[in-house]
Amino acid sequence: MRNNIVAGNWKMHKDLKETKELIEGIKKGLNNSEKGTSRVIVATSFVSLTTAVDAIKESIIEVAAQNIHQENAGAFTGEVAASMVKSSGVGVVILGHSERRTYFGESNALLSKKVKQALANDLEVIFCFGELLEHRKENKHFSIVEEQLKEGLFNLSAQDFGNIVLAYEPVWAIGTGETATPEQAQEMHAFIRNVLAKKYGEEVANTISILYGGSVKPNNAKEIFSKPDVDGGLIGGASLQAEDFVAIANSF
Ligand code: PEP
């Protein structure tokens, strides 16, 4: 069976003190609740990773990075290697977020290299992808998503694919307050699982967690997560408040 996952993408928010405080708040909230997701992940800035790793001790929370460089070492001033992330006690990295694609020009081809580097360093990957509003208006959203998957991931073996979590994030819903309807999310997630099944077979397709991302909040998470092919969420804005994030994690 696949895992239910709620992952918070803190983006460029929270200094060291705030990192500790937010994790303490999430821990407290999760401890006081009876249910919840099987996995809860927080993706902090590089600077906060070791502080976060320390703060999550004795909890179910895991820490993720938000990026890595495609090479494992070298003269790349200002960059961070997968091996460095791994050595800080982190086991997960987010790759392909739309902000990285848009503001830093990350292409499917580059992301494919980053994914390989992450896996070579024993990092699990949360791979983000999703269409722009104009794609959806032109009814190209399925073909765009299929292309992102094929070009970013489909050179992996079925075994390597076991270390991938997918995060479908329609770009028009990220940070906009506009959410895909639960039906739109389910329709796309079922499509994605079908694309996976064609490439890797039903068994692999049925074990891969597919998260939805895009303005998930405590008041809409339950309905979105209730859809059969939605296995949780990647949460931006609402992951910055412990109370909201815990409420979302408890929405299954
Ligand atoms: C995100 O940045 O991945 C995201 C889903 O953001 P938000 O929840 O704020 O839309």
Image (tube, rainbow, N blue to C red):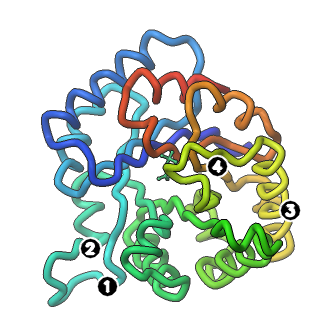
What is the x, y in percent for residue 147?
70, 81
| Distance from Cα at disc 3 to Cα at disc 4 | 21 Å
Q: How many marks?
A: 4
* Residue beneath the point at 63% across and 69% down: 132
In primary-sequence order, the first of circles 1 and 4 is: 1
**Which quarter of the figure has residue 194?**
bottom right
* Residue beneath the point at 23% across and 32% down: 55
In primary-sequence order, the first of circles 4 and 2 is: 2
For the residues bearing labels 1 and 4, Cβ distance under 8 angstroms: no
Q: Residues within 10 Å of mark 1 (few under 14, many from 20)?
A: some
Q: Which residue is mark 4?
A: 212
Q: Which residue is mark 3?
A: 202
- Mark 2: amino acid: Ala
Q: Which residue is mark 2?
A: 81
| Distance from Cα at disc 1 to Cα at disc 3 | 33 Å
Q: Which residue is mark 1?
A: 71
* Residue beneath the point at 22% across and 66% down: 84
Q: Nearer the viewer, mark 4 or mark 2?
A: 4
Helix, strand or loop at mark 3: helix
| Distance from Cα at disc 2 to Cα at disc 3 | 34 Å
- Mark 3: amino acid: Glu
Between 142 and 197, the one lying in front of the other is 142
Helix, strand or loop at mark 4: strand
For the residues bearing labels 1 and 2, Cβ distance under 8 angstroms: yes
Ligand 1 within 8 Å of disc 1? The answer is: no
